[in-house]
Amino acid sequence: MLLCTACLVGLQLLISCCWAFACHSTKPSPDFTLPGDYLLAGLFPLHSGCLQVRHRPEVTLCDRPGSFSEHGYHLFQAMRLGVEEINNSTALLPNVTLGYQLYDVCSDSANVYATLRVLSLPGPRHIELQEDLLHYSPKVLAVIGPDTTNRAATTAALLSPFLMPLISYGASSETLSVKRQYPSFLRTIPNDKYQVETMVLLLQRFGWTWISLVGSSGDYGQLGVQALEKQATDQGICIAFKDIVPFSAQVGDERMQRLMRHLAQATATVVVVFSNRPLARVFFESVLLANLTGKVWVASEAWALSRHITGVPGIQRIGMVLGVAIQKRTVPGLKAFEEAYARADKGAPRPCHKSSCCSSNQVCRECEAFTAHTMPKLKGFSMSSAYNAYQAVYAVAHGLHQLLGCASGVCSRGRVYPWQLLEQIHKVNFLLHEDTVMFNDNGDPLSSYNIIAWDWSGPKWTFTVLGSSTWSPVQLDINETKIQWHGKDNQVPKSVCSSDCLEGHQRVVTGFHHCCFECVPCGAGTFLNKSDLYRCQPCGKEEWAPEGSQTCFPRTVVFLACQEHTSWMLLAANTLLLLLLLGTAGLFAWHLDTPVVRSAGGRLCFLMLGSLAAGSSSLYGFFGEPTRPACLLRQALFALGFTIFLSCLTVRSFQLIIIFKFSTKAPTFYHAWVQNHGAGLFVMISSAAQLLICLTWLVVWTPLPTREYQRFPHLVMLECTEANSLGFILAFLYNGLLSISAFACSYLGKDLPENYNEAKCVTFSLLFNFMSWIAFFTTASIYEGKYLPAVNMLAGLSSLSSGFGGYFLPKCYVILCRPDLNSTEHFQASIQDYTRHRGST
């Protein structure tokens, strides 16, 4: 309450100051007032303000020569027409008449004075201090206007404590929708919030990411620039240059010259001009003076269709103009109403008496002097704005219609408080010449914009409607085929700091703006996501990408599949070996008591053949997708089986050497070897040692199936982990030592009897074994592809085949092809020859 009291005291001080203006020579024009049961106020800029230095607070004299505003005049007449139509209507407010008090708000001081007049009580010219403002009953119930955001903010702030409805036809700033500050404010022009969003969508539609931004001094331009900068930046658009045209700007002054220089240096092709009409004219006159042409200018609704701007000499040279404009609307009968007003006999203005107080902002000498030939022409932009004022009058009338209960056909006339009318205006929903009139919770209308382009193709300026913008949410609908771009081949002008990068190239920002960048290709294994053009993203574990890619591709999972030709060949070879081993075992079993089989080791041969068969069976684990059992068994079973074979081969060669060379020289050792079953003991110990190594390997360095990603960027290798373990190395080193031992023992027996001399074949098979594994490890060091398991299997198959071929095939040949050599007599003769030969040496 103290705040309200202080506010009212301030109001009285203001109104006392405003009374001190020097206009005592004219009387208020009768066109500005109309008596009625309920009064509305209208605030219209019938004249433009002028800059002057004042040494005391006083109201600007509006009715000055050369300051008449045709635009404001059409708004003024639209309200008068609306009230007249409503008073003549039998459906809207029957048996109730509306009156009005109209004011010329050519300046801020005139606007404040008119607002205070609106708040004054009937009769006395003052605002009464009251404790309860809800029961304050001024002579005016609602206000239409004013035109600009600055003036509307002032008026709304003064009217808000009284909750007097204020419906503006031209104030579009988003701040006026804040109900906490301006609870009684409404408007019939769209909110700048939607205009800003529309502009940003327009920039995005044509790919303009590098723009200059110019606004006019005052709330409309500065707040519009601020909102546009924020939304544009949020959408990835960069502001190359931003400036405000000052209120005092003049064409050619130092401030405007500097602005033009900076605008030219910004290199942006597109310039958004969020300005009111007077300062927009100053700006474009400066643009022409600086010869800053060939650009695309994006216009705010305040000047997009204004003849005040299109009338600038040479304006057609500035380039392409796209704009956001309020939808074209027509006030039916307004032109005829203005013509009738011009023809009417208004008489000459009479001087007022010295004792009376005259209001200079309720006089328009030019208006009274109009004739049918000299009256202002009603053009598109003014008609659309006039429709907003006309719509505001009807919104108040419909609110009052509901408040007075006129639906029954008769209105109950009584005292009405402004706040009661405000409640009803918020609820209105009616059709006005096929347009729905209603307000949202913020007091904004449900409207839309036109997207227009200036057209100078004919002898006179006109504009083309390219599409529209609707909300919410804000959406653009543009027919681009209607646009005639100023450039070669009717191409959309570019306005970017840096051209788009090639696919798969990330943007590396250079400087302060993210729109200025260099293009760097994404590295292998990364890709450029379109949602973030400034950073290459790593591919997933199961994906890959080449250098400069904009997407990732699934990795190919590879392993030694059974269906491949290489696999079929190895499988066939291994199966053949296994069949040969089984066949040899059967052959040896059938000829077990023959000298050849007994000399080969007798029953020990079956252990050797079985160990080779076990090794051969383990090789099947290399085919197909690796599994846990396959990984556990394939290398360990092969190593153990080959160890048993090598142990038997070693002990067999060693045993022949003992029998033929050391039985007589070292009989004690020979007898101990025979009595203690040295051959079997050696095979058991040697095999047990390898078994211990393999078990330790399987427990400590357990071979498991794994997916290998590092070796090839585009492949996932399915393999076992045994090749990387110490157990694998120990097992193969052990077999290497056994191979060397077998080789040594075989070589020492090179001079044994022919039937017992296996040195050549065994030496050849062991050398082939060495070569196979040397080839494998050499290949593994330089090749890590999907066929490495095949190379590993081939090495194992070669080792098994060489062992089988070097030891068993010669004996099979004798059994099958030379049965004459498989006799006791032949073997005894061979031993006798060996004994005679040794005796002679």
Image (spheres, grey):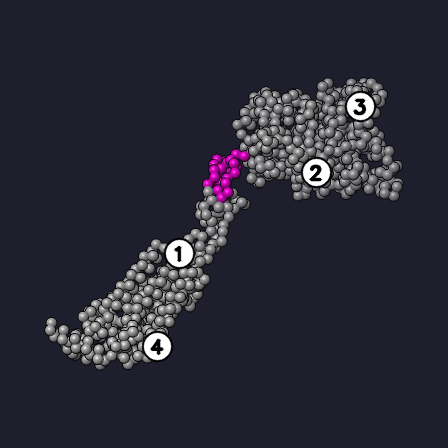
Whole-percent x, y for residue 124 in the image:
80, 29
Tell me where the magenta segment starts and ends, as one range: 496-520
Whole-percent x, y for residue 556 in the image:
47, 55
List the residue tagged with mark 4.
Answer: 586
Q: Is residue 67 above or below residue 713?
A: above
Label 4: state its secondary structure: helix
Asked if residue 86 lies left or right of residue 840, the reply is right
Name the residue: 25% across, 66% down: 763
The N terminus is located in which quarter?
top right
Q: CA distance from mark 4 to mark 3?
A: 135 Å
List the residue tagged with mark 2.
Answer: 448
Nearer to us: label 4 or label 1: 4
Q: CA distance from mark 2 to mark 3?
A: 38 Å
Whole-percent x, y for residue 491 in the image:
59, 33
Nearer to us: label 2 or label 3: 2
Amino acid at pointer 1? Gly
List the residue tagged with mark 3.
Answer: 28
Q: CA distance from mark 1 to mark 3?
A: 100 Å
List the residue tagged with mark 1.
Answer: 785
Nearer to us: label 1 or label 2: 1
Label 3: state its secondary structure: loop
Query: Would you say residue 509 sits in the magenta stretch?
Result: yes
Asked if residue 159 lies left or right of residue 349, the reply is left
Amino acid at pointer 4? Gly
- Nearest the viewer among 436 and 137 is 436
Q: Which mark is residue 43?
A: none
Q: Earlier in the sequence, mark 1 or mark 3?
A: 3
Instruction: Report which quarter residue 361 is drawn in.
Output: top right
